[in-house]
Amino acid sequence: MTQLGERAGPGDGAVANRAWWDERVPIHLASDYYDLDEFLAEPDVLRAFETDEVGDVTGARLLHLQCHIGLDTLSWAHRGATVTGLDFSAPAVDAAEALAAELTLPARFLTADVYDAADVLTGETFDIVYTGIGALNWLPDIARWAGVVARLLAPGGFLYLAETHPVQDVLDDESGSTFDLDYFDIGPIVWEEEGSYADPDAETDANVTVEYHHTLGSVVSAVAGAGLRLEFLHEHDCVPSQRFDTLVHGDDGLYRFPPGTPRAPLLYSLRASKS
């Protein structure tokens, strides 16, 4: 990646980021990373720690914010939840709807910015608000996001967040053993890179993104500040893709540091409930 060194103004990232995601929808649909043939045969891509920590979702009303093409959303539907997915990319929502139809899974998908979710859903509330890996780095205001989540939760409902650990974000790409970036620099930082995490060799035109770094403390504080009660915060030594060259692929499909080497946290998950 090339850090361009520019700082974006408030809201400047939305247009560039949406263009980035819109262009990558067909790339992701065709990629081995998402492997739609396997997903259509067995629509469940959730990690074991996610399903263990969320528990039985049969009959639960679940909202997935920033759902992209809906694979996680439809995995929860496959497990018995009544699901709604929301994303700011219209092509991604179209793809999610097509997958739901092909799988004959009941699911609703909406196109909207995550900050507008509570207004778009006009008073609806949910038993579970879920956000998956790789979502929060696109959001400039984490406290505002947490406030939206609180509005969307029904009393007794909970937020479940599984996300890239912010320590992972600042480590060197090769070994993941040294700090390359400032952990406390929240950005916004402008990046430019061709391709996609799902297909690095893909030819792309919309290559500029504006991203934000949210420390673990800032996320927990935002959730608590929105009036939600933290039930747990877990840190994990695994990640779904080979983020660093040194990571090794495990039997569970996740990547970890080699045995005997010092480990850094790669993912985290938290659950917080609404009274």
Image (spheres, grey):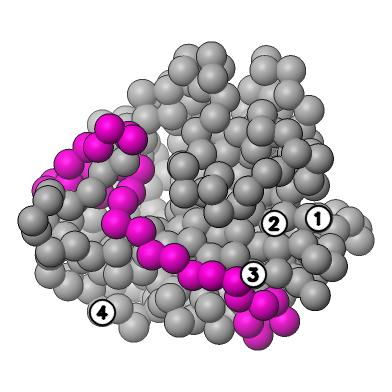
* Relative to 111, residue 237 above or below: below
Q: Is residue 26 left or right of residue 244?
A: right
Q: Earlier in the sequence, mark 2 or mark 4?
A: 2
- Name the residue carrying label 1: 126
> In 3D space, how far apart are the residues under numbered discs 2 and 3 (Cα atoms)?
10 Å
Residue 108's mark?
A: none
Whether the residues at callouts 3 and 1 have beta carbons within 8 Å, the answer is no
Mark 3 secondary-structure assignment: strand
Q: Nearer the viewer, residue 201 or 123?
A: 123
Indicate the position of residue 71 as horizontal and vertical percent values. Answer: 57, 33
In this figure, which residue is indicated by the disc labeled 3?
272
Q: Which residues are magenta?
A: 224-253
Residue closest to the far right: 123
Mark 4 closeness class: few <14, some 14–19, many ≥20 residues within 10 Å: few
Of callouts 3 and 1, the N-terminal one: 1
**Do the residues bearing badges 2 and 1 touch, measured as CB atoms within 8 Å?**
yes
Mark closer to the observer (3, 4): 3
Q: Is residue 25 magenta?
A: no
